[in-house]
Amino acid sequence: MKALRIRYSKLGKIRFTSHRDVARIWERSLRRSQIPIAYTEGFAPRPKLSFGLALSTGYESLGEYLDVFLRPEEAGDLDLAEVPDRLAAGLPEGIEVQAVVPLDAGAESLQQTVTSCTWHIEIGGVGPADVQRTLDVALAATELPLTRERKGRTVTDDVRPAVVSAHVIGPTDGPHGPGTTIEVELGTQPRALRPAELIAAICPPDAPWPLVRVLRVHQWTQAGGARREVLPLPSAATPPPHAEVRAS
């Protein structure tokens, strides 16, 4: 065993922590857990970790991924069943380890593995009928142009190929009043389409939809022509508490 793949959730107030700060949290937790992680060489060695697709600050997730590379001479003594509890002692409220598995040698990186993500997006102040009409127009369109900044330049891309599916789940009555929750599947290759970018592409510029909550529900990969979760939860596992309830 040369590496581990860890699945974890990120829910609640921890959503305001940036991707870079979450990486630092994991580095501290791994050190405290005394898991035999490998380090880079050179003047300032760093833990050998590989994170999946970055989660935007303010977004939550039912399943994020992290690859941890181990020191070969000590990896054989590691009891995988103990790893979640050892890690939990150094993790803040809102980050929960859901599964830990050995990573096969030569496995693709998480950035290459994930081909699309499913999101639940709560929109404030817009009813389900209006939202569904807008989604129907977007799905029927041959192009969805989106203008954004990239490396200091303004570019316009057609993001329609990245919209795999989109539909209304139902009305919501959150802390900001009535609204609508939609489920969308967005592609990640060659460049990931973010939920906020999708909304910007399908809404009139003078009437953008306010995003109340964005939750990543699944990260998908392709195996043998079939779509599957990168690392499914064990059958005995339970979803994080209040996963679908608006976090404070």
Image (cartoon, rainbow, N blue to C red):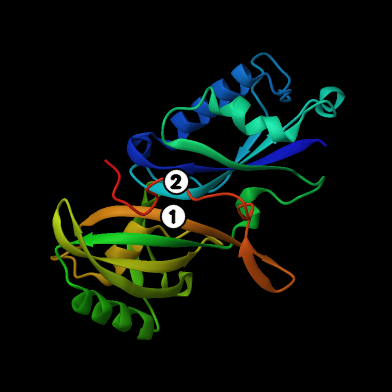
Residue type of the residue flagged with mark 2: Leu
Instruction: Estimate how packed mark 2 is, as few (under 14), some (14 to 19) or many (20 or more) residues with alpha carbons within 10 Å.
Output: some
Instruction: Please provide percent x and percent y for residue 144.
Output: 36, 74
Is residue 229 or residue 159 the one in the foreground? 229
Q: Is residue 112 above or below residue 43?
A: below
User: Residue 224 in the image: x percent, y percent?
Assistant: 75, 71
Residue designated by label 2: 55
In front here: 88 or 162?
88
Q: Quadrant of residue 100?
A: top right
- Which residue is found at the position 28% from the left and 50% from the top? 246
Residue 186: assigned label: none
Do labels 1 and 2 touch, CB within 8 Å? yes
Q: Residue at x 55, y 21 (%)?
A: 28
> Disc 1 residue type?
Arg
Between 246 and 5, the one lying in front of the other is 246
Q: Which residue lies at the image location 17% right of the left edge and 72% below the top edge?
A: 127
Q: Which residue is mark 1?
A: 216
Which quadrant of the figure contains the C terminus? top left
Question: Between 81 and 193, which is closer to the camera in this rendering?
Answer: 81
